[in-house]
Image (cartoon, helix red, strand yellow):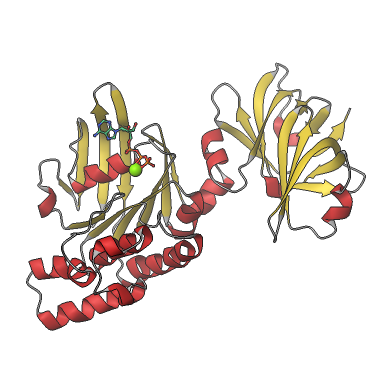
Amino acid sequence: MSVSFKGVTKRFGDLIAVKNVNLEIQKGEFFVFLGPSGSGKSTLLRIIAGLEEPDEGEVIIDGKVVNRVDPSKRDIAFVFQNYALYPHMKVYDNIAFPLKMRKYPREEIHTKVLEAAEMLGIRHLLEKYPYQLSGGEQQRVALARAIVRRPKVFLLDEPLSNLDAKLRVRLRFELRKLLHDQLNTTTIYVTHDQAEAMTMADRIAVINKGEVVQVDTPGRLYNNPVNTFVAGFIGTPPMNLLKARLQNGRIQLGRLSIFSPSLGEKKETQDVILGIRPQDVKIGSEEGIKATLLGVEKLGGGVIVHALLEDQEITSYSEQRGLDAKIEGKGHIALLFDGPLYIFDASTDELVKVLTDYKFEVT
Ligand SMILES: Nc1ncnc2c1ncn2[C@@H]1O[C@H](COP(=O)(O)OP(=O)(O)OP(=O)(O)O)[C@@H](O)[C@H]1O
Ligand SMILES: [Mg+2]
């Protein structure tokens, strides 16, 4: 089923939790709402489920306005952020419950419960009660209960938040495979974890303060962020965002000068934000832009270097070999920019240009 929002606004008293949201989610799509805490993600999901009523606008499921349709009539499975299991039922019966309600035959219920439990790695817990389980185990039971039946839409609100890192990485892969590749069910998934969003989604809506900032594929969000919010939210470590000025076809950042034919010759000065990903900031041996070394974080596979460039903090991320020799015991290091530069308008935070052909010099 397709799901769309037309001018949807939701207020809680003075607070605007969701502001004029327009979205079209296709049938079979794996769609993610990504945003920081309090941005309105859960509220959007609850509006689709019918647990909150919008103050303005329409919610359309499969071409029909459902604003006044009861939640139970929407054929939607919801895993809440604060999932609640039935405390007096064993795990097996919790998972079987939606099927029993719909009067499935016993044998079929049994097969489906085992299948779901197998996938989520909780087969050994079927005879336990919820109070005997850890938070992560309870969360997996809630997921199993949602996937045993085949609803037309899955709404999942941070369903992996209570799991350890290893399990989270495995399950995000398994969940997408099951919900998207096998069942082909429309799935709307909420998370504040950009890595989860990037790996799972067909498309992502980035939400900030109740508003949809950008809707795009993971690749396009990463390569063409519409503003500094998206640029800083997608990718780890976050994109460097440095204050600079644009004049006469040059970007000036303290003594560092960047020039490019695609910048134009505009005479008047414009305040801009210069964005560059840490992966594109390389550590040179001698040549390069001088910066003061602030510290180093070693991650095993890669290294994050923190430095001060013309009084602004900048980070570099690399898996470069021989890096130690370039930074160890040094107060100063040399930086090289090697990758796209993003120019944002400092007054609106919006992307103006992506530069790929540029040169830099220190004056
Ligand atoms: N029932 C409510 N009454 C009053 N305010 C609410 C209610 N539900 C949500 N809010 C407010 O609306 C805003 C959006 O909340 P929402 O739960 O949608 O955020 P979220 O993006 O899901 O955040 P999180 O990542 O922390 O779960 C928040 O400022 C929140 O305090
Ligand atoms: Mg939430």
**Along the line of sight, the residue nearer the viewer: 299 or 31:** 299
User: In this orientation, does residue 358 appear?
Assistant: no
Residue 132 position within the rendered picture, expressed as x and y whole percent measured from the top left: 29, 64
Residue drawn at point x = 78 percent, y = 57 percent: 320
Residue furthest out toward the front: 132
Image quarter (top left, top right, bottom left or bottom right) of the C terminus: top right
Q: In this view, does 252 lie to the left or right of 275?
A: right
Residue drawn at point x = 47 percent, y = 55 percent: 196
Image quarter (top left, top right, bottom left or bottom right) of the N terminus: bottom left
Residue 144 position within the rendered picture, expressed as x and y whole percent measured from the top left: 28, 67
- On the rendering, which quadrant does ligand 2 occupy? top left
Residue 217 position within the rendered picture, expressed as x and y whole percent measured from the top left: 47, 52
Q: Is residue 226 left or right of residue 337?
A: left
Residue 176 position within the rendered picture, expressed as x and y whole percent measured from the top left: 39, 65
Residue furthest out toward the left: 103
Residue drawn at point x = 32 percent, y = 77 percent: 124
The quarter of the displayed image where residue 159 is located:
bottom left
The quarter of the displayed image where residue 52 is located:
top left
202 is higher (above) or lower (below) than 149? above
Total residue callouts: 0
